[in-house]
Amino acid sequence: MITDKKSDAWISIVDESINADVSRIMNLFIQCSSNFFSAALIDTDRNKFVALFDYRFPYPLSNDDLTEKILQIFEQNKPLLDNHYDSVVLSFCGFNNTLVPDVFFDADRLDEFYYANHQRQSTETTNKLLFDNLRRISARNIYSVPKSLFDFFNSWYSNLSIFHGATPFIEGVLTLHKNTSERTVTVNIQNTYFEMVVNQGGNLLYYNKFNFMSTEDFIYFLVFVYEQLEMNPESQVLNIAGTTEKNSAIIVLTSKYIRNLQFVQRPSFAFYSYGFDEVAAHYHFSLYNQFLCV
């Protein structure tokens, strides 16, 4: 059900087939940012998502406060979020990143690649540089995450794979439109930022992440990219993922600038318990697509 009274989750769905003895054949997918935490369980025998949790925080939390909040979430959702899975996949969302083609990539030069696009901050000494392999486009996604969060999750889960949130988003979009010849535009909208992908079939033409504080900020960045890439807002469809409501101020204003809006659907490579029907299909697109990363 949505908003279980026993927790402060925005969304809480647990399939009736799950009992206290959580099977090891299920895999756990997690996404974490400074202002949200979401998790999903997939039953690998049936290739079916059977649980979903989503917590939204009213403002970005510090690393210490976020760790404390996640511990509370773990306690509320025992044993579903405990350390007993063969595979746990975690994405750090909203943190700065940069893409580098494989032909130029050198693991010994992560600092050089990352700071070519991002200003070095005083807190960087407490951060950890990581990279993912974007297999569909032969590129690497380099990103920085707080070392305290990295260490916390590694101490909690023994079979952990870590990615940046952009990785399943990009892989998911490219997989969804791999047989499409025309240009496709997709945004993943979260509370304080959005990601934007422009692709043509399996070719990535553009990716960027924008932080925004208002609806007007969002429209400014969106229209700017349309103009820079010479895309016609009268004809170029905008595909929308993320957790924005279909009647939200962002969507209402966007529809005045971009004629054709379309909401993405859940990935078709898996099945979903009936409780997922209560959740908008365009929510958690990148969370589900962590399936493609491992």
Image (cartoon, helix red, strand yellow):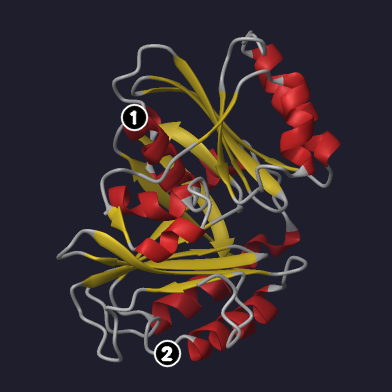
Indicate left or right for 50 with 224 as reference: left
Residue 51: image x %, image y %?
A: 38, 70
- Circle 2: residue type: Lys
Front residue (pair 27, 155): 27
125 over 281 or under it: above or below? below
What residue lies at 25% left-to-right and 90% top-to-bottom? 21
Q: Which residue is mark 1?
A: 137
Instruction: Please tell me whether mark 1 sits on a helix, a strand or a loop.
Output: loop
- Circle 1: residue type: Ile
- Residue 233 quadrant: top right
Q: Which residue is mark 2?
A: 78
Name of the residue lying farthest toward the left: 45
What residue lies at 32% left-to-right and 78% top-to-bottom? 16
* Mark nearer the N terminus (1 vs 2): 2
Residue 22: image x %, image y %?
A: 26, 84
Front residue (pair 278, 157): 278
